[in-house]
Image (tube, rainbow, N blue to C red):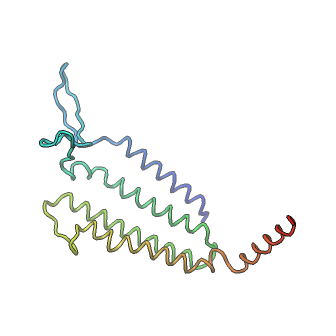
Amino acid sequence: MNLPVVLFGILVALCLVTAVAFVIEETPYEDVPASGGGVQRVRAGHGVTHPAFASMDHGGSGAERHAPILWLAWAFGLLQLALIVGCLMLGLAPAGRARYRLAACGVLLGVLFTMMVATYRGYLDTAAPLPFLALPAPTAWFLYGFWPAQFLVVALYARIFRRAVLTGEQSARFRAILAEARRRQD
């Protein structure tokens, strides 16, 4: 597997998801009679004027606004996670278990992010969702799952750094090159 090529593919996929987000039809919309005859499509996805506070917009139904594009947010988030984990893998030695461990951490983050998005999708359809540990379920997935799991990735990377990223042999070689360069300067 050529990791830089895979990372470039992920970056292109991120660009495509962003492009789709810009060209997908905005919802909700309403077809209203136009002043010159015919029908005019009015989009209300950015909110409509609040009845009590004219300077504030309110969005209306979350299901109507978010359901058609939630898959884009999910895809974008997973691609970002893949790009981050892939970039961390660039510094690792190609052979070794460290890449598999880091990939497993990335899969864990992807599953937790997917659960966060899935429970948010469930919230779009229910009127009064039940809280989980005093928080809405998507927020609970983030605070109690996704957020601490990121520290697992950091701890793993810090633990394997001397074995998989900068070995003692490489460090000694670097110090020798640096000493030689200083000797030449003097």
- x 39%, y 74%: residue: 148
Report x, y in % for residue 9. Answer: 53, 55
Q: Is residue 20 left or right of residue 159?
A: left
Q: Is residue 14 left or right of residue 138?
A: right
- x 75%, y 78%: residue: 172
Relative depth, front residue between 80 and 31? 80
In the displayed structure, 151 sits above or below 121; it is below
Relative depth, front residue between 97 and 143? 143
* Rendering quarter of residue 31: top left
In the displayed structure, 150 sits above or below 69; it is below
- x 61%, y 72%: residue: 92
Report x, y in % for residue 88. Answer: 55, 67
**Quadrant housing the C terminus:** bottom right
Q: Is residue 14 left or right of residue 137?
A: right
In the displayed structure, 158 sits above or below 18; it is below
Report x, y in % for residue 179. Answer: 81, 72
